Image (tube, rainbow, N blue to C red):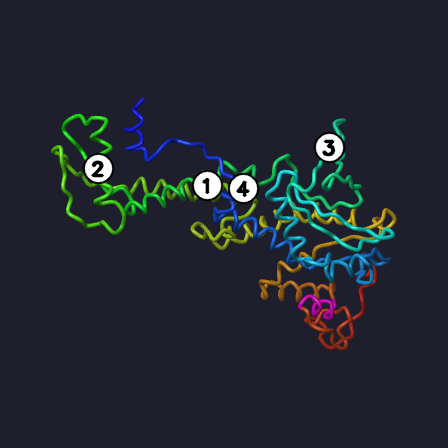
Amino acid sequence: MPADWLFELFGGGAVTDYAVTGRQALEVPAVASAISLISGSIASLGLMVERRGSDGWVSADDHPVAQLLADAPNDWSDTYSLIRDLVTSALTQNEGGLAWVNKRDGSPVEIVHYAQGSFTVDYSSDGRQEPTYKIGNREVSLGEVIHLRGPFTRCPLSLASGAIGVAAKLERHVGSLFARGARPSGILKFPGKLGADTAPRIKASWEAAHGGAGNSGRTAVLEENGDWTPLAFNSVDSETIATWQFAILEIGRHFRVPPSALYDFERQTWANMESAQKEWLAGLEFWLRPLEGAMRRALFTAEERGSHRIRFDRDDFTAVDLTARATAINGLIASRVLNPNEGRDWLGLPPRFGGDTYDNPHINPNGAGTPPVEGNA
């Protein structure tokens, strides 16, 4: 085992573990990007309250829940912020994200998101895992709580702590190298054995004279018959970058965010880009479905749950690609799944006269279409 001073001289400092705090984890760009992307994407989706009708699910904009979510869930925040903060808490806190629903005569009048440390969640020890909730010292019922968490006892941020620690340490390491003059460019060699006092003194003198970008190019004066040997660190630099990239990829895997969404386009092709987009949408369902269920339980009465639901509008994800959206609408109209006015509604356009008929404009552009009759389609 080398002496402490020798290890510090060639190792750059003492070895520590890779643990990082939550605040330090959010300073890693890949982590902050993944969390803000997931929470912001879900919060930006349209939130619809629907009622089960004879012909399927229809909009229920007149329901008190719809009016509460459309306006503001409380006096100091909007619905976007509520959903964003709730998902962010579920991604970063082991106990998940929690919002309390204030009800008056059985109808919700306010939804309040609570920060970490202001509530506790306990689970029954009989194997059923039935939760009980306390906000402060006050116990609240299951029907008053919107609780969102992952499938494990730890959140994605906690599960990814190893990869996050590696990325954070590498970032600091590279920053330290640049602070000392971009990267180690050579080594000092001495023919004789250096004493415990001599080596640190030479190291300090050399760093003072030649360390940092402002001292580059200065004439070197060596003592103790020392010799300066330049080094080529290309392979080491490459391995450092590769390890850094792999750590970022591991972070993306924990959060189920594709590399392209973290602005890593190095290995992207048209084929795997499309596949990554599908996996990204599938990963969002991981949070959308539980959130819809939690809101349904907390915002509707027991009688309403069978006939009402809350749904995030997934169609908003296709709005970013107008060509794909137009192609899909055109195909659905041609196959008489949608009528033209329903397609126009997808684009946020008002209905037009004669647009409520179901016909294929490519086959019978001038004929009046009628909805297909079951059994004769």
Q: Is residue 262 left or right of residue 123?
A: left
Give the structural element (helix, strand or loop) at label 3: strand
95 vs 32: above or below: above
Residue at the spot of label 3: 123
Q: CA separation, marks 4 and 2? A: 38 Å
Q: Earlier in the sequence, mark 4 or mark 1?
A: 4
| Residue found at x 78% / y 71% | 357
Residue at the spot of label 4: 22
Inspect the image, locate mark 1, and give the three-letter code of the amino acid beneath it: Ala
Residue 286 position within the rendered picture, expressed as x and y whole percent measured from the top left = 65, 45
Residue at the spot of label 1: 247
Q: Earlier in the sequence, mark 4 or mark 2?
A: 4
- Place residue 53 in its image quadrant: bottom right
Which stretch appears magenta? Answer: 339-347
Q: Earlier in the sequence, mark 2 or mark 3?
A: 3
Q: Nearer the viewer, residue 55 or 85?
A: 85
Which class describes the residues within 10 Å of circle 1: few (<14), some (14-19), or many (20+)? many
59 vs 35: above or below: below
| Residue found at x 13% / y 32% | 224
In front: label 3 or label 1: 3
Residue at the spot of label 2: 187
* Overall secondary structure of the magenta section: helix
